Image (cartoon, rainbow, N blue to C red):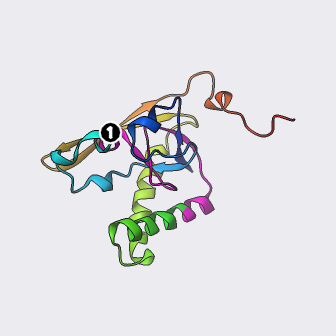
């Protein structure tokens, strides 16, 4: 099963988002945050979060690029519970148990989005406000010959 993790190629997310996601944190679209927004809400860094930001499930921060990677069922369960808690803390859900079905749906949508993509496939999101609400479009950037893991250091440098 696949999900997506935040990835940074430079420091731009640190400047364009009020609260940037951490590198490697699990992410979902997070478009629900903007469900009641109007054009008047789309200013400054909030506009950038709306237009192109994935939601980090640990920090609640935003990131421009995510990379598809494998997720374990136990991690998925923990992420779902954390998202349900996020709904309680920030959106007034009455309890984690009441928020779990919505959190499960949000996570399932992201799993479905990532399902048919190879590891290291990059995804971007673009949002716009329409008469019907928030419209999301996703772009897929296929991995090249060099995997993303060639740009990150894994393990110890002492090996």
Quarter of the figure with residue 100 = bottom left
Closest to the observer, 17 or 73: 17
Is residue 54 found inside the magenta-colored segment of the image? yes
Q: Report x, y in % for residue 37.
A: 21, 52
Give above or below for 69 relative to 100. Answer: above
Q: Report x, y in % for residue 141.
A: 46, 29
Closest to the observer, 108 or 49: 49
Residue highlighted by disc 1: 48
Which secondary structure, mark 1? Answer: helix
Q: Is residue 127 visible?
A: no
Give above or below for 60 relative to 153. Answer: below
Q: Which contiguous range is marked in magenta? A: 49-78
Mark 1 surroundings: few (<14), some (14-19) or many (≥20) residues within 10 A: many
Is residue 31 found inside the magenta-colored segment of the image? no
The residue most toward the right is 159
Residue in the image at 41% along x and 45% along y:
54
Residue in the image at 73% along x and 38% along y:
154
Give above or below for 40 relative to 57. Answer: above
Closest to the observer, 22 or 128: 22
Q: Report x, y in % for residue 83.
A: 46, 63
Q: Report x, y in % for residue 127.
A: 28, 41
The quadrant of the image that shows the C terminus is: top right
What is the count of numbered marks? 1
Quarter of the figure with residue 64 = top left
The residue most toward the top is 145
Residue in the image at 41% along x and 69% along y:
89
Residue in the image at 40% along x and 61% along y:
105
In the visual, does 41 lie left or right of 7?
left
Q: Is residue 71 visible?
A: yes
């Amino acid at each position: 099963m696949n999900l997506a993790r935040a990835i940074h190629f430079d420091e731009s997310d640190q400047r364009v988002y009020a609260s940037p996601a951490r590198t490697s944190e699990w992410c979902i679209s997070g478009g629900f945050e903007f469900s009641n927004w109007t054009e008047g809400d789309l200013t400054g860094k909030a506009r950038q979060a709306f237009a192109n930001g994935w939601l980090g499930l640990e920090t609640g921060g935003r990131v421009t690029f995510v990379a598809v990677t494998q997720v374990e069922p136990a991690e998925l369960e923990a992420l779902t519970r954390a998202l349900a808690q996020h709904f309680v803390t920030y959106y007034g859900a009455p309890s984690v148990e009441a928020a779990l079905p919505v959190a499960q749906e949000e996570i399932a949508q992201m799993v479905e989005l990532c399902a048919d993509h190879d590891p290291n496939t990059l995804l971007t999101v673009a949002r716009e406000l329409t008469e019907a609400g928030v419209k999301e479009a996703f772009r897929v950037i296929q991995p090249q010959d060099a995997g993303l893991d060639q740009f990150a250091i894994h393990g110890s440098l002492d090996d």
